[in-house]
């Protein structure tokens, strides 16, 4: 009887834990399904249609949107622009954030204040960030050109020169995301035992050697997470381009991203079918890059 009662109590406890567990994750799962999973399939479905008049009566056209997409030079130029942005923003922001995190992980005076200052750009509205940087980049009276002129340099058209505009946008992205990356790296650094550094100091290793031989390998799991999430986010860049590059800007064709192109076709030209096809292309590219990263991490990420 005693064994039967214990078994019954265990069963009730396991059932209660099961129900409570599902109760806690159900809101998150519901949000993911409603806001992420269902829209993905709706977008894929929409990509096989041509938007009807006034947004109604969509016409099934099969793969015509994809045929047009592969022949559209503006799509491939937007893809090149997006990759340029990602190639500049991701590694530079990660490197700077890691260096700052290592410095602010030391026992220095006022480090909490410094951490807050570096994190502030993440909590500022993107529109405010775009307005400030648009003023800094202004070719007539911007602060950057004023500094260059004072040093005897020439005026630079940061946002209207097609050759450098995308890199100017990338600078804004780097400045914005450094604080977020820094916080993640700080969390990873605080998990590294101090014994490793003390042993390295006894062996005569200097700060640079400790950084590359201890810090980088032990923080590689955090770095892998940051790299994956930043690559995905950088390939979806839109807000800074939308707010800093207007439609009459001659640099727009060399700066518009795939998401910007999707916005233009889907909401400005009301061609949601073709816009959906562009999003599907971006989804496939992100999935391929993420899979490559998952395989590549086996060679440089150390989990022990």
Image: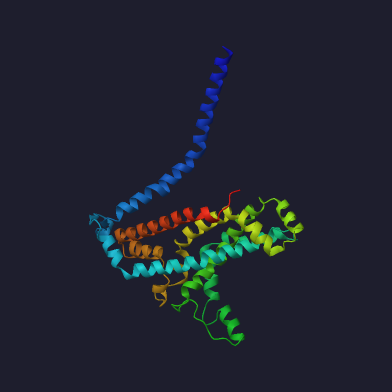
The spot of residue 111 in percent (x, y) is: 71, 60
Identify the residue at horizontal 41%, vertical 66% (top origin). Answer: 257
Rendered position, 68 above or below 223: below
Is residue 116 visible in the rendered image? The answer is no
| Total tally of numbered discs in the picture | 0
> Percent x, y for residue 233?
48, 59
- Residue at horizontal 51%, vertical 59%? 230
In the picture, measured across the screen, residue 226 lies left or right of residue 57, that is right
Q: Decide if residue 65 is on the left or right side of residue 165.
A: left
Residue, far bottom = 152
> Between residues 211 and 63, which one lies in front from this camera angle?
211
Q: Quadrant of residue 73?
A: bottom left
Left or right: residue 291 versus residue 133 is left
Question: Residue visible at 72% across and 63% down?
Answer: 206
Image coordinates for residue 59, horizontal then vertical, percent: 22, 55
Locate residue 205, reporting x and y percent. Answer: 72, 61
Closer to the camera, 113 or 217?
Answer: 217
């Amino acid at each position: 009887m005693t064994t039967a009662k214990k078994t019954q109590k265990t069963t009730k406890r396991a059932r209660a834990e099961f129900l409570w567990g599902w109760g806690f994750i159900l809101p998150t799962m519901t949000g993911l399904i409603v806001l992420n999973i269902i829209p993905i399939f709706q977008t894929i479905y929409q990509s096989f249609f041509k938007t009807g008049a006034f947004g109604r009566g969509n016409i099934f056209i099969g793969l015509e949107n994809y045929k047009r997409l592969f022949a559209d030079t503006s799509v491939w130029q937007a893809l090149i622009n997006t990759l340029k942005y990602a190639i500049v923003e991701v590694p530079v922001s990660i490197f700077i954030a890691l260096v700052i995190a290592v410095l602010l992980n030391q026992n220095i005076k006022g480090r909490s204040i410094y951490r807050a200052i570096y994190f502030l750009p993440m909590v500022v509205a993107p529109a405010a960030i775009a307005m400030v940087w648009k003023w800094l980049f202004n070719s007539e009276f911007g602060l950057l050109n004023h500094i260059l002129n004072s040093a005897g340099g020439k005026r630079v058209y940061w946002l209207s020169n097609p050759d450098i505009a995308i890199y100017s946008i990338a600078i804004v992205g780097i400045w914005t995301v450094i604080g977020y990356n820094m916080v993640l790296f700080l969390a990873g650094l605080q998990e590294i035992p101090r014994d490793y550094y003390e042993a390295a100091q006894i062996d005569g290793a200097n700060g640079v050697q400790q950084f590359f031989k201890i810090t980088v390998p032990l923080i590689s799991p955090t770095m892998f997470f940051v790299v994956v999430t930043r690559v995905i986010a950088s390939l979806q860049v839109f807000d800074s381009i939308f707010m800093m590059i207007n439609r009459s800007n001659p640099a727009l064709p060399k700066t518009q991203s795939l998401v910007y192109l999707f916005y233009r076709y889907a909401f400005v030209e009301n061609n949601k079918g073709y816009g959906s096809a562009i999003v599907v292309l971006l989804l496939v590219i992100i999935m391929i890059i993420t899979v490559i990263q998952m395989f590549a991490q086996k060679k440089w990420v150390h989990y022990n």
